[in-house]
Image: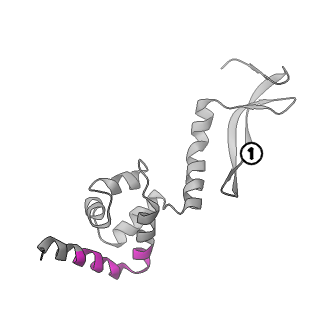
Amino acid sequence: MADRICHECGVAMVRDTRPQAFEYKGQVITIDQPGWYCTSCGEGLLMPEDMAATDPLFEAFRDHIDGILPPAEIKRIRKKLDLRQKQAGVVLGGGASAFHKYESGVGKPSLAISNLLRLLDHDPSRLREITGHQADEARGP
């Protein structure tokens, strides 16, 4: 890409990676942010690809603050419960393809699903209560 001139002070900008603090709900994370930076005043210019490079880190930070389980943790707990992805979606909620989406990072579980998985991770025997209740409902009155 061609040289950039700072829109604030008119001095040349350089391509660099600099630490950038991001705040979310009172919590702060510092991420190394690529971009164009002014050699004089320090003003930064971020291109779409610069944001794309750090968005996953910021998104993971937000999810952590919000209590949303990461994909690898969802997969670990599902396997611990000995459920296939489709089974987990049907039994725990979200639908047949939900856990495929959660585990691939395409979709995010709700806080309720994250909390349910945490509870089942601590006490997998409680899964029988859910599956037994669903079997009772399927039989009807």
Tell whether 117 sits left or right of 65: left
Q: Residue furthest right?
A: 40
**The residue under label 1 is which amino acid type?**
Pro
Closest to the observer: 49 or 94?
94
In the picture of the structure, the residue carrying the numbered disc 1 is: 19
* Residue interval drawn in magenta: 119-133
Closest to the observer: 17 or 141?
141
Tell whether 66 sits left or right of 104: right
Q: Is residue 124 magenta?
A: yes
* Residue 35 in the image, given as x and y percentages of width and height: 69, 33
Q: Vertical placement of 46 versus 90: above or below? A: above
Q: Is residue 80 magenta?
A: no
Quadrant for the N terminus in the image: top right
* Residue 23 in the image, given as x and y percentages of width and height: 69, 52
* Residue 53 in the image, given as x and y percentages of width and height: 59, 39
- Chief SS of the magenta region: helix
The local secondary structure at tag 1 comes to strand
Residue at 26 percent across and 56 percent down: it is 96
Closest to the observer: 141 or 105?
141
Q: Residue 86 sits in which quadrant?
A: bottom left
Residue at 25 percent across and 74 percent down: it is 131
* Residue 124 in the image, given as x and y percentages of width and height: 36, 78
